[in-house]
Image: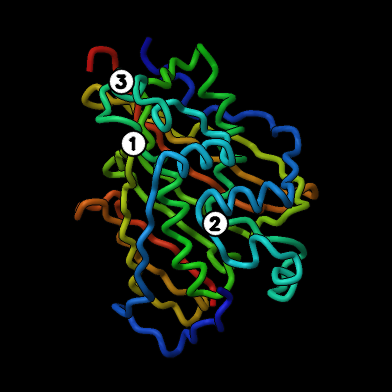
Amino acid sequence: MSAARPDLATLAVGDTIGTRTVEVDRRTLVRYAGASGDLNPIHWNERFATEVGLPGVIAHGMFTMGTAVNLVADWAGDPGAVVEYATRFTRPVPVPDPGVAVLEVTGVVGAVDPEAGTVRVDLTVTFEGARVLGKAQATVRL
Amino acid sequence: MAVNTAYAGRSYAPTAPYQVGREHVRAFATAVLADHVAHHDVEAARALGHPDVVAPPTYAVVIAQAAEAQLVQDPEAGIDFSRVVHADERFVHHRPIHAGDDLVTTLHVDAITERAGLAMVTTRCEIADADGAPVATVVSTLAVRGEGS
């Protein structure tokens, strides 16, 4: 998935860089827990999650943040081109068992800085039609 | 027990070096469903100018959360993890993280504010390489619900 780098000079605010659908199941969460070291049981233990008032097992916010930026990294042609990335976590993503939670990711050019050689991509990440990340913005050096 | 606001402004000693392993970069990339070749294939990463496989943009959270444990797991800090929600996260990459890096993290507690039964704990991890050159800055805010809320 290493495409040629986008040409900064041809980019305009409002351009869509792409969309992506991500399916998340319990196995996805267990794998993220293991790889990240975040073993908080709200991400894999239904009993614990409901005891602390959640609707059930929820995805790691950092999983959602981490998977959403793939769209930007692939578009940029180099994951190392992402120089800044931030978000707020606005809604939990409950992950059913059995079944999958489906995330929809869209990226739009939010700012172009020709002097710095950077582009800000604003990500919209939704679950069941509602945004789960707030102000998710990735700055890419092209 | 409430969050101890006296911890605001505190800084910790630099951590022991965290060695970024190639297989761990691959495993983390797989875990966030990142299939860009530069995470997985050394030659592809080198073709892009990286010395080894490049870590995904949020990989630094692994290193940051290990450092944040100095605060979060300190009983005197009063952070009850069963009452914690992750509020926000910011990464600034001074350069990409690669397999083979030895990274040292200095944890700072930038702010602890309380409002409406919530304590907002903002930490900043300054991650540097073995020579002390800055690699990444990770700013994270945890929201801790008070007792009975």
**Chain hosting mark 3:** A
Residue A10 pos. (x, y %): 42, 90
Residue drawn 59% across the image and 48% down it: B28
Q: Is residue A17 above or below residue A47?
A: below
Residue A7 pos. (x, y %): 49, 87
Dot 1: element:
loop
Q: Going by the image, does B130 lie left or right of A59?
A: right
Residue drawn 66% across the image and 55% down it: B97
Residue named by callout 3? A52
Residue named by callout 2? B57
Q: Going by the image, does A134 lie left or right of B56?
A: left
Callout 1 amino acid:
Asp
Q: Residue extending furthest top?
A: B1
Residue drawn 68% across the image and 74% down it: B48
Q: Is residue A86 above or below residue B106?
A: below
Mark 3, other Cα within 10 Å: few <14 / some 14–19 / many ≥20: few
Residue drawn 60% across the image and 33% down it: B66
Residues flagged by tags 3 and 1 on a common chain? yes
Q: Earlier in the sequence, mark 3 or mark 1?
A: 3
Residue A74 pos. (x, y %): 51, 70
Mark 1, other Cα within 10 Å: few <14 / some 14–19 / many ≥20: few
Instruction: Assess whether mark 2 and mark 1 are in contact (beta carbons under 8 angstroms).
Output: no
Q: Residue extending furthest front?
A: A98
Q: Which mark is residue A97?
A: 1
Q: How is the image coloured?
A: rainbow
- Which mark is nearer the camera, 1 or 2? 1
Mark 2, other Cα within 10 Å: few <14 / some 14–19 / many ≥20: many
- Which mark is nearer the camera, 3 or 2? 3
